[in-house]
Image (cartoon, rainbow, N blue to C red):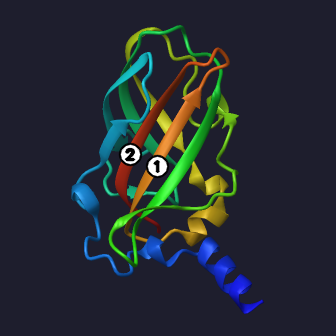
Amino acid sequence: MLQTIILLILALFPLSSYGIGCEEEFPGDTDRKLNWFPSCSSKIIIHSVKPIDEYGRPEYPVHVDVPLHIRVNLTNNGPVFTEGKVTTNLWSWGGWFGCDWHTVLTFGILSNLDACTNGIPCPIKRGNQEIIIVMDFTKWQTIIAILGNDAAYQIEQIISTPNGDSFCITVQARARKY
């Protein structure tokens, strides 16, 4: 019984998310800048990713206790994106046995959401354009509550369309609450 309780606590509140035992607090210069990369092949090519505040001003570190705005410059070489689903995966940096990214359990509440009503501006037309993606974690206070303040996080968004096309972006950033 005691082992079950300890495993449940570790699953819900992983100590690794707070960087215990990890000497590198912010990997890849995330203490000073956002890192990003496309995490799947796609007809949508991402050229740049910049965190901004609600007024369009550069913001770093990012804040997860208010809606997070990301300015994305992209080229859509596929059909117009008018509907789809978005899944958001979240990792924290740290570790007892060396530094690594560790999954933050969200129990599926950030999976298979309607993209156009959850931060992806629809439609995404063909050609080069700039869009603002809004990730509003304030809807999910249970997730914000377990995140450490002023820590490194990795967020991946997978956006898929009914015809099977998808585009994916992963960002690594220093995030604060309050």
Q: Is residue 31 above or below residue 114?
A: below
Residue occupied by mark 1? 155
Label 2 vs 1, first from the N-terminus: 1
Kind of residue at badge 1? Ile
Residue count near mark 1 (Cα–Cα under 10 Å), binned few <14, some 14–19, many ≥20: some
* Quadrant assignment, res 163: top right
Q: Residue furthest right?
A: 1
**What residue sits 69% from the left and 87% below the top?**
3
Q: Are marks 2 and 1 in contact (CB under 8 Å)?
A: yes
Q: What x and y, as percent, mark residue 16? A: 45, 74
Residue count near mark 2 (Cα–Cα under 10 Å), binned few <14, some 14–19, many ≥20: some
User: In the rendered image, is residue 57 in sight?
Assistant: no
User: In the rendered image, is residue 72 in sight?
Assistant: yes
Kind of residue at badge 2? Val
**What residue sits 45% from the left and 63% below the top?**
92
Residue occupied by mark 2? 171
Q: Secondary structure at mark 2?
A: strand
Q: What x and y, as percent, mark residue 149? A: 43, 71
Q: Is residue 69 above or below residue 99?
A: above
